[in-house]
Each structure stands twice: as structure tokens, then as C-alpha cells.
Image: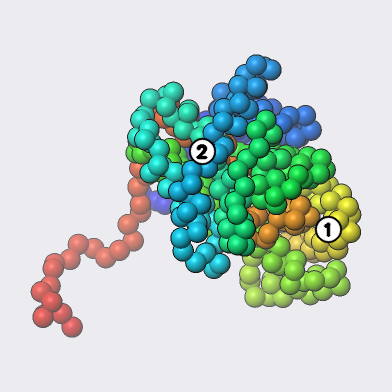
Amino acid sequence: MTATRGLEGVVATTSAVSSIIDDTLSYVGYDIDDLTENASFEEVIYLLWHLKLPNQEELQELKKQLSENAVLPEEIFNHFKSYPIENVHPMAAIRTAVSMLGMLDDNADEMNKEANYEKAVRLQAKIPGIVAAFSRIRKGLEPIQPKKDTSLAENFLYMLKGKDPSPVEVEALEKALILHADHELNASTFTARVCVATLSDVYSGITAAIGALKGPLHGGANEGVMKMLTKIGNVENAESHIQALFQRKEKVMGFGHRVYRNGDPRAKHLKEMSKRLTNLTGESKWYDISKKVEEVVTFEKKLPPNVDFYSASVYHSLGIDHDLFTPVFAVSRTSGWLAHILEQYENNRLIRPRAEYTGPDLQKYVPIDERI
Ligand code: SDX
């Protein structure tokens, strides 16, 4: 048995949810360029969960279900209020809150198809509110419950900031949510599938996935990008800062990808959005620094930016706190995780690979007082 490091190139499952073929990303066969241009995030959620685009009636029904299930139980607020959270990373908080939602759901362990779909709706509906509530409570503000008949993107910004977002902000977040919704068998989606393949419940699968997304080699990179841009501070410093990272053999956050070779197709949309939004906020320096960093990294290492690179300056321009960038990724990716969880349940087999053993040969137990 020979191990493949990082499972590179290993095909671990079949899936009809999304595909990456020749550097083109599609959800159920629809190119993300097409969806980003034309669809709403709710339509994309429906697409991922039902493997077809909804008609008008089906879309209205999903929106109604999401709206009806978006109100958070007081227990979540009380939990956030019950301990000092200033130094808690929001990803740890939402991971815990999702786990808690599972404890509060009497049907958490009901495993039939309908019950699992209902849990998917409940979770997708509540996750924006969890992120917003955590953000407000840690600032000493009261959490805000969602509005009715409002899109998920608009409601999230409303609950986060306590005022109606502008149409430009809503459109930008909507597109970002669509772009982050699913991505074949990325690390967090694989984690979710491994978890529920034991026939564990939906909440456990999403809790595990949030844990995997948190890391800086995965979703945590977008926060890392903003830290880097902030440290660089102005365009003139960009080249020397990146060269110093190379010298120290450190990774440049937001660059490289296991699957794409010629570039992440989501990055161009986020780059365009970054340019437009930073211009509107009068802070085009974030776009300018990003562009310079891209020039240096692609010239020196031939590594193109991934989804996390320009999303950093996009979220910053939307007035989102930097440590909430990865939670925003999670709000979107919950739709993809849930699609994969539902798909896994449909045709389940335990996921249990092998390890190539590299330890010592069989040896005899030595009593403790005879050991040196
Ligand atoms: C996401 O998989 C998905 O689908 C994830 C995602 C999704 O939508 O779910 O697309 C979202 O997680 C995007 C990736 C976010 N992470 C980062 O931006 C962190 C920085 N990037 C890397 O650490 C790296 O590129 C990974 C983690 C994304 C990919 O890692 P791999 O495939 O294991 O590649 P590697 O680390 O083995 O790198 C191969 C080579 C190495 O050089 P050599 O040792 O061969 O000389 O490329 C170099 C690496 O040092 N390299 C980098 C680099 N990325 C790769 N060098 C500097 N900076 C980088 N960012």
C-alpha cells in the first residue's frame, strides 16, 4: 500500500453537484460565469439541492421556507452572551452554534430523506443570522432578527449592520455567495461527506465542515489575505513584502490551488468586483495593492490568485470585519455542504481509506520498570 500525499489526484466519490473540468467550474452543468451573471443565490441553493433550476413556484416555496426558518432561538444569543467572546474567533463561534442548533433540534437524528431536507433548510436559513448575531453581541450590540421576504444576502447585511444595505452592496454579496457556493470535493466538503457517511446527522456534518474551512490553507485564507494587504499598506511596499515572504518560504495567502493550473475561474469576477467596489468606497488602494501582489506572484511563481484573494478586498469594501470573511464563505458554502450531505445519504457507503504504515516492526511489550 502506497500513500498519495494529500490524496492528490485521488477520485474519492462520484457527485452530480459540481464539476471542475479544464479549469471551468460548473454547478450541475451550469457554468458559474452564467450563474453569477444571471441567477440569485436562492436559485443556486435550489439547483445544488435538487440538481435542477427551480421554476417560479419552486423558487418562491424555497424562499418562503428559508424566511420562515431564519429566526434564531434565544438559546444561541444567550450562549454567545454567556461567556467572554472578545478573543474567540468567529469560526469557532459559528462551529459551536451549529453544533448547538443540532442539540436544540428534536429531529436531529431523524434520518429519512424529508427530515434531512428540512434540516438543510433550517440550517441554511439560520447560518447568516448566527454570524451576524455573534458579530453584534461581541460588540455589545443586541442581535437583530431577520426581515421577512428579503433575500438571504440582503438579510445578512441587514442583520449584521442594523440598517438596510445599498443595492450595490446586496448585488456584490449575492454574486460572492454564488461564487463560493460549491467546489467539488474540497477539504471541507470531503470532511462533511466523511462525517455523514458514518450515518451521523446533518448538524455534525456541517459542524465538521466549518472546522475544516477554518484553516488558512482553505477558507481561512481570505482573512489572511486582508492581514497581508493591511501589512503591505501601499503599492510601493508590495513587491518587497512578497519577495520577503518568498525568502522565508512562506505561502502567499490567496494564491495557488490543488486543482486549477491556469487559474481559478471565480477570481476574475471577484477581481472586477474589487475594482468597482474599492472605487466606490474611495479606497482603491486595496485593489491597487492586490493587483501589484498578483503581478509579483504570477511573475515569480507562476501561481494565479484563487477565490480567496480578491474576495478579501470585496468583503472589506462591504464593511465586513476581517475575521468575518471566512464565516461569510461558510454562509455560502453551507449550501454546497448540504447538497453533498444529501447526496451522500442517497447512496451511502462508509468512507474508510487505508494508511501506509511507517512505524516500527512488531515488537514485544516491555514492562515499565525494565524500560530505559
Ligand atoms: C480554497 O480545494 C478547493 O476547492 C478549495 C477552495 C474551495 O472553493 O473550496 O477553492 C477554496 O481553499 C482556496 C485555497 C486557499 N488557500 C490559500 O490561498 C493558501 C495559500 N495557498 C497554498 O498554501 C496552496 O496553494 C494550496 C493549499 C491552496 C494548495 O496546496 P497543494 O495543492 O498542496 O500545493 P503545495 O502546497 O504542495 O504547493 C505546490 C508548490 C510548492 O512549491 P514546491 O515545494 O513544489 O517548490 O507550489 C508552491 C509550494 O510551495 N506554492 C506556493 C503557494 N501555493 C503553492 N508558494 C507560495 N505561495 C503559495 N500560495
Q: Is residue 98 visible?
A: no
The spot of residue 109 in percent (x, y) is 35, 35
- Taking depth in this image into account, of 250 and 272 the one nearest to the observer is 272
Residue drawn at x 73%, y 53% is 315
Give the side of residue 370 with respect to residue 74, left or right: left
- Taking depth in this image into account, of 369 and 168 the one nearest to the observer is 168
Say above or below: 118 vs 291.
Answer: above
Residue drawn at x 46%, y 55% is 79
State which quadrant residue 127 falls in. Answer: top right
Q: Are the residues at dot 1 and dot 2 in contact (C-beta closer than 8 Å)?
A: no
User: Which amino acid type corresponds to the residue marked 1 in the rendered image?
Assistant: Tyr
Q: Which mark is residue 287?
A: 1
Q: Is mark 2 within 8 Å of ligand 1?
A: no
- Taking depth in this image into account, of 185 and 216 the one nearest to the observer is 216
The spot of residue 95 in percent (x, y) is 48, 52
Residue drawn at x 75%, y 68% is 230
- Taking depth in this image into account, of 340 and 245 the one nearest to the observer is 340
Which structural element holds mark 2? helix
Which quadrant is home to the C terminus?
bottom left
Which structural element holds mark 1? helix
Q: Which mark is residue 123?
A: 2
Q: Is mark 1 within 8 Å of ligand 1?
A: no
User: Which amino acid type corresponds to the residue marked 2 in the rendered image?
Assistant: Leu
Q: Is residue 117 visible?
A: yes
Choose the circle earlier in sequence order: 1 or 2: 2
Q: Residues within 10 Å of mark 2 (few under 14, many from 20)?
A: many
